[in-house]
Image (cartoon, rainbow, N blue to C red):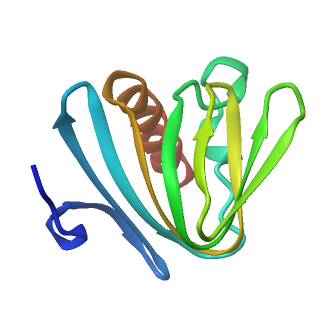
Amino acid sequence: MKLQKEDIPVVMEAPDMIMRSLSGLGDMTVVFHELPKGTDFTPLLKGLGNDSCHCPHWGYIFEGIFRFIYDNGKEESFVAGDVFYAHAGHTAIVDKDVKFIDFSPTKELDEVMTNVGRVMSEMN
């Protein structure tokens, strides 16, 4: 299978933000993110176990800086050119406008995204 970024369907869009997602890659989903500085996933994870993301992610940073904060308090920053693995039990904050791709187990990612959708609808 071969895809261009533009072939991945847009699932969320707001000013300065685009999230593209495609499942069906075995048991994995690919997500291409374009997120502005200051994006904080923490409030969107409320209601999940430990109020954190229980989905692991493997990815690559094209531009910017993205920081994972794990349940144990450890923080890891990833910058352009970094390949990363973020284990389950984290939140994330964008420290500099970021573009990255990640691959995640579909089941866990769907659970997290369902929660994110619920929280966002309650915010509106």
Q: Is residue 111 above or below residue 29?
A: above
Disc tally is: 0
Residue 9 point in image, percent of width and height: 19, 60
Task: Look at 52% across and 28% down and name the residue there.
Answer: 55
Which of these two is toward me, 2 or 38?
Answer: 2
**Picture quadrant where residue 24 is located:** top left
Q: Is residue 56 above or below residue 60?
A: above
103 relative to 38 in the view: left or right: left
Residue 38 point in image, percent of width and height: 72, 70
51 relative to 1 in the view: left or right: right
Q: Is residue 110 above or below residue 44?
A: above
Farthest residue to the top: give it.
49
Residue 73 point in image, percent of width and height: 90, 33
Which of these two is toward me, 73 or 59?
Answer: 59
Task: Look at 65% across and 33% down and name the residue there.
Answer: 46
Which of these two is toward me, 37 or 60?
Answer: 60
Which of these two is toward me, 101 or 73?
Answer: 101
**Picture quadrant where residue 72 is located:** top right
20 relative to 56 in the view: left or right: left
Residue 10 point in image, percent of width and height: 25, 64
Farthest residue to the right: give it.
73
Task: Look at 64% across and 50% down and name the residue there.
Answer: 41
Task: Look at 73% across and 21% down and name the residue there.
Answer: 50
Farthest residue to the bottom: give it.
16
